[in-house]
Amino acid sequence: MAGACSRAFLLGLAALAGTASAQDETKPPATYKDLPSETPAKFEPTNDGFDHVRREVMIPMRDGVKLHTALLVPKGAKGAPILLTRTPYDAKKLTSHAESAHLGPVLNGYDNAMDVIVEGGYVRAVQDVRGKHGSEGDYVVNRPLRGPLNSTPVDHATDTWDTIDWLVKNVPESNGKVGILGISYDGFLPLMGLVDPHPALKVSVPMNPMVDGWVGDDWFHNGAFRQLNVTWIYDQVATRKGEAKWWTSHHDVYDMFMQAGSAGELGRRRGLDQIGFWRKLTEHPAYDAFWREQAVDKLLTKRPLKVPVMLVHSLWDQEDIYGAPAVYKAIEPKDVDNDKVFLVMGPWYHGQEIADGSELGALKFHADTAREFRRNILAPFLAQHLKDDAPKADVAPVTAFETGTNSWRRMSAWPPRAEEADGGGPRRLYLRSGLALSFDAPGAGDAAFDEYVSDPAKPVPFRARPILPMGYAQGQTWSRWLVDDQREASGRPDVLAFVSEVLTKPVKVAGEPVANLVASTSGGDSDWVVKLIDVYPDEVAGQAEMGGYQLMVSADIFRGRYRESLEAAKPIAPDQALAYRFALPTANHVFLPGHRLMVQVQSSWFPLYDRNPQTFVPNIFWAQPRDYAKATQRVFHELGRMSFVELPVVPSH
């Protein structure tokens, strides 16, 4: 009884304390007349000496949601076109790279082609997409178009239309013409603007766009999950303004992923199961309707082509290497006069076209290739379509940097048309016994196969360890991993490295190489990684570090469970030689005399991609430790069971 009275007494005290606390909260904050605040109630900057005017506006969408937009207008502008970028990456941050009175420093960084914007006298508009940073509404990653995956009345196409409509009516310095451009996610959004374009949208420039998240861009490649992207998902989707940050636990992320076991388990440990997009990823590991109906290239094939578009692609794009060529392939047939669809391919990493393009990793180019693109291609192209008095730009339908010879090429189409290829065509580069590589097919005396043991306990690293996290901060090297020297992999016992004789003539490839493997596994599932590599001469005068360098020209992964159908996973019959055919990323490269060709084959690329347990499980995200098992992998190269890479060879001039 006494205990009950004590509890009642304590509860009464708590209630009184709560009442007092509530009363305290209603009191105005203390102020002191004798010592007033030195901070004004509202400070108005003078902006003395600024060469531009900044406006922060909330633009209403058709459903009442308002989207935060930063406008930077050159001082004295009149009849200026508007360059719009829509982004989930914080419009204020992207337009505040420096605390400066001058527009150049303010825009010098992602996602701004600064020199083109400033020298062109454009009004710069950068907008937070709905649900991110200063904008209202709900955030959905790559929000699908209205339809089966989106029952709401809005999508990025409607938001783009409504934004452009507001801009041309409310920016008095404008000439009423708008162009939209951006990189990566910001490159996906200009494609959405093409779905139902506003009449004032005169040009679209998607750079390194996210297009198909399952086939070959951010989330999967041919069914293998790109698990390094868990950090992006956490940082980007967990909170509206990105306050929640992924934390490090290991210097070498290889160890972090190995310790967790599966990607799903790592996500569970880090709380990703609270995030809607993560749940969608783990629930849709196959190429089902969820992915197919979002694939932008497929969506645009169903829409009329109304707006000139320049697709910008990086040949060593470590994030979205599939998107731009896929969209080009989808919409180019609609361009009957060959004057609306343009493709530019440069020797860059993801987004390097707005940075310094003089080099990439160990590769050195003749000049700043990115600056050449911006000055000679992007600037005149934008001006033609957006400025009232600009001349027609001298831009070819396809402008592609040819690596190896390090020169720009102008073409009418990609891949080059028959007349431009001058007799070229697909050639089979055969994997031969003795780890040889040749354009000659295997003979009767060739051994049937080469083999290796793939052990999930020791997966092949995708680059030399220690492996740093994905990112672009100073000291990180994520952006250049696709040009890493592949010698470390070629010396491993679980990697087959087939090498040609030294070339006496150049071999030029222009287009998509296609891997054709005849292979078997002793397990019930398997991944297959195929890399096309340029092996440099044993010594290179003037650049000693390039002696024997193994440069990846094109490479990708295929998850074997989707051999028969991308839509439904099926176990692989053990120890049966089966055919696997999949395209590698597009290339425009010359293998020079004195070099050799190499093809590497392996069954893991870790931790870029999650480990295949090599026993069949319904969903690899939730594979258990007992599911991971060694497997003997055989690659066949005999008559009737030949493995080869189909090369799009064209004559080299």
Image: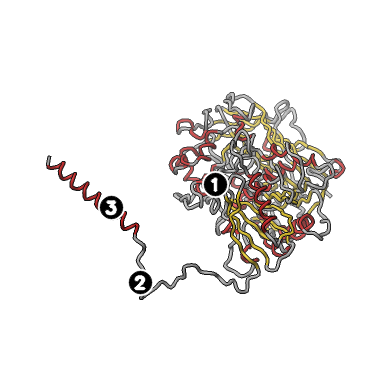
Q: Which residue is mark 2?
A: 32
- Classify residue 582 by image quadrant: top right
Q: Is residue 362 above or below residue 521?
A: below
Badge 1 amino acid: Gly
Disc 1 from disc 2: Cα separation: 41 Å
Residue 478 pos. (x, y %):
58, 52
Alpha carbons under labels 3 and 1: distance apart:
36 Å
Q: Secondary structure under badge 2?
A: loop
The residue drawn where x is 59% and y is 47% is: 488
In-front residue for pair 374/14: 14
The residue lying at 54 percent from left, 69 percent from top is 44
Decide which of tag 3 and tag 2 comes sooner along the chain. Answer: 3
Residue drawn at (59%, 57%), measured in percent from left and top?
A: 57
- Residue 453 in the image, given as x and y percentages of width and height: 56, 34
Residue at (87%, 42%) from the top-left corner?
419
Residue under pointer 1: 137
**Position of 302 relative to 539 (above/below):** above
Reading the image, the residue beneath label 3 is 19
- Decide if residue 227 is in sight here: yes
For badge 3, the amino acid type reads: Thr
Amino acid type, residue under disc 2 in the picture: Tyr
Circle nearer the N terminus (1, 2): 2
- Of circles 1 and 2, which is in front? 2
Label 1, secondary structure: give it. Answer: loop
Closer to the camera in the image, 123 or 645: 123
